[in-house]
Image (spheres, rainbow, N blue to C red):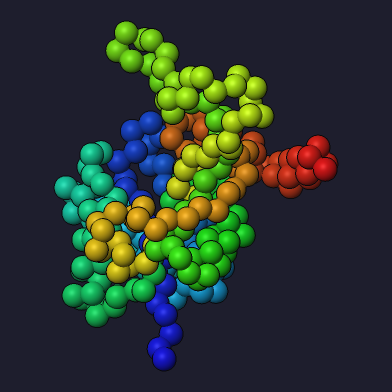
Amino acid sequence: MSKEKILAYIPARAGSKRIPNKNIKNFLGRPLIAYTIRQARACDFVDRIMVDTDSAKIAAISRKYGAEAPWLRPPDLAADQANIRDALIYFLTKLENQENYAPDYILILQTTSPLRELKDIEACWRLIKKGGASTVLTVCPTHPRLYYLDNGQNIILANGRENQSTNIQAWRPAYILNGCFAYIVKTAAFLKEKNIITKKTKAVICDKWRSVDLDEPADWLTAELLCKNKKHLAKKIKLMTT
């Protein structure tokens, strides 16, 4: 039986408004995207690492750190409103047409999660290989009582359980997607459902403190501080919870 093909797909648009040139901005000594590429290279189950970008500069830097970047994403798939689903479908179609390569699984790694660890990716891979899921993604804990504001700025409980106890321990644990640490999706399911989060989706829980998503400058500064002190923080948190 032929070996399964696993593609590490790294989306990296150039048009970041809040943090200009985010994907190649220096993060603690090297371009941000380099961390994701090096992490993908450490995954022994991955056979190809490819960056999907609309920038020749990002593509060149990606190749320097060991990823493939064979073409540039079309402008209409790199706009602010563009959907990663559409970009991925385009990428897979072009990859199959030009190189006759069709992966069995796609590992989607965002560059904006610098505190992601190899163990997070490996946990996703183990879970999807157990069966019963066509997508495995990462989440982190959040407050179980979430609210939103309507147009009149009235506060409304998002999950509609107003009569439940105000004691936090009485609520079921809640989770949110943690800045897209990692997704692993079966290619056939993704192409059939046209969605990365497929009908059979399971999750791996990651540390909340590591789930910083680089969306604004404050996130960047926070992530650098956390990365610099990661080992110390992990040790202190472990001591406080045991």
In the rendered image of this protein, does residue 147 appear above or below residue 154? Answer: below
Query: Which residue is farthest front?
Result: 163
Left or right side of 163 for 77? left
Where residue 121 sits, quadrant-wise, is bottom right
Residue sitting nearer the eye, 100 or 206: 206
Residue sitting nearer the eye, 109 or 85: 85
- Residue 39, image x, y percentages: 54, 61
For image coordinates 48% across by 30% down, the residue present is: 217
For image coordinates 16% across by 47% down, the residue present is: 76
Viewport quadrant of the C terminus: top right
For image coordinates 24% across by 63% down, the residue present is: 192
The answer to whether one can see residue 34 in this image is no
Where residue 172 sits, quadrant-wise, is top right
- Residue 198, image x, y percentages: 34, 56
The answer to whether one can see residue 73 in this image is yes
For image coordinates 69% across by 44% down, the residue present is: 230
Left or right side of 133 for 116? right
Query: Which residue is farthest bottom?
Result: 1
- Residue 163, image x, y percentages: 51, 19
In the rendered image of this protein, does residue 195 appear above or below residue 105? Answer: above
- Residue 187, image x, y percentages: 32, 67
Left or right side of 18 for 151? left
Number of numbered discs present? Answer: 0
Viewport quadrant of the N terminus: bottom left
Residue sitting nearer the eye, 153 or 221: 153
In the rendered image of this protein, does residue 113 appear above or below residue 158? Answer: below
